[in-house]
Image (tube, rainbow, N blue to C red):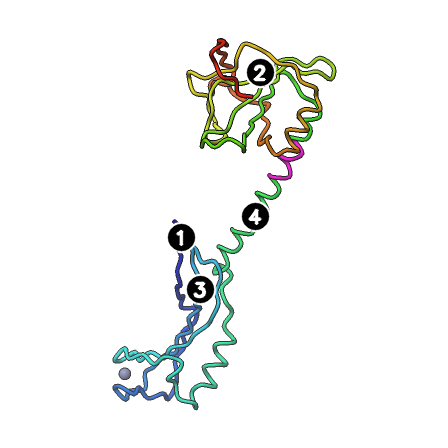
Amino acid sequence: MIIYGWNAKNIKQAPLENYECPNCQQKQSVIVIFARYVDIFWIPVFPFKKTAVIVCTNCKHETEENNIELGTKGAIQQLKSAVPIPKYLFSGLALILFAIAFFTYQGIQNGEKENAYLGDPKAGDIYFLKNDKGKSANNYYLMKVRKVEGDSLWISYNSFWYSRMTKKLDPKDGFYNIMYSMHKDGLKELQTSGELKKIMREYSAADGFDQEVEFHESDTTAN
Ligand SMILES: [Zn+2]
């Protein structure tokens, strides 16, 4: 859930001379300029408006900008436009732009890395694949490169299906101890068809990606 809202920050306060409070008739008012801004998770994202309020320091009576008499309005407008909007009210916007730049950069880096992996497969590479034709919610499976012999690859599949790109293999899961041969170009086809979601070369044995399971005739293979 994203918590967002509007907030106002007092950015300037100045005494307003000779202004008679409509409530107590004292001449002790101040003019307060607010910057209104949008916030998300309490971080100011961007300011969108400056507003002015006259506050009587004697009785606390407030006069909103719309109700301010014409004579006083000019001075208020001047003050309003002279007050700069504090830069920190753009913090959220800066954060958002930074995050977009960061993830775009990371995405490009990952894409380049995956293309390099595809062009030069190595034993141990793990491919995360998704079978989009499957009706089940569990349609992610894995393929591991076992051996590379020239343009031919020996690959094996894992035994479980997952609902997403799992970060860990189930303790009972593992790669079957039987291998299939495949032409190197088959990897590019997996990418073209959209079936390939991710290639992993560096991983930790602690996450189970080195686990093996024995293949039985009764098992349904992943392909
Ligand atoms: Zn007053």
Decide: is 79 above or below 187: below
Tell me the kind of residue under disc 1. Answer: Phe
Residue 119 included in the magenta stretch of the image: no
The residue pinned by badge 4 equals 100
Within 10 angstroms of label 4, few (less than 14), some, or many (20 or more) residues?
few
- Tag 1 and tag 4, C-beta contact below 8 Å: no
What distance separates the C-alpha of mark 1 from that of mark 4? 18 Å
Say whether residue 182 is left or right of residue 216: right
Q: Secondary structure at mark 4?
A: helix
Say whether residue 163 is left or right of residue 149: left
Q: Which residues fall within the magenta stretch?
A: 107-113
* Residue occupying the point 57% across, 43% down: 103
Within 10 angstroms of label 2, few (less than 14), some, or many (20 or more) residues?
many
Residue 112 included in the magenta stretch of the image: yes
What distance separates the C-alpha of mark 2 from that of mark 3? 56 Å
Say whether residue 204 is left or right of residue 180: left
Q: Secondary structure at mark 1?
A: loop
* Residue occupying the point 28% across, 80% down: 61
Decide: is 125 above or below 22: above
What distance separates the C-alpha of mark 1 from that of mark 2? 46 Å
Percent x, y of residue 5: 39, 60
The residue pinned by badge 2 equals 156
Decide: is 22 above or below 51: below
* Residue occupying the point 62% across, 14% down: 180
The residue pinned by badge 1 equals 41
Q: Secondary structure at mark 2?
A: strand
- Mark 3 close to ligand 1, CB under 8 Å: no
Judged by its main secondary structure, the magenta piece is helix
The residue pinned by badge 3 equals 37
Mark closest to the chain's N terminus, 1 or 2 = 1
Within 10 angstroms of label 3, few (less than 14), some, or many (20 or more) residues?
many
- Tag 1 and tag 3, C-beta contact below 8 Å: no
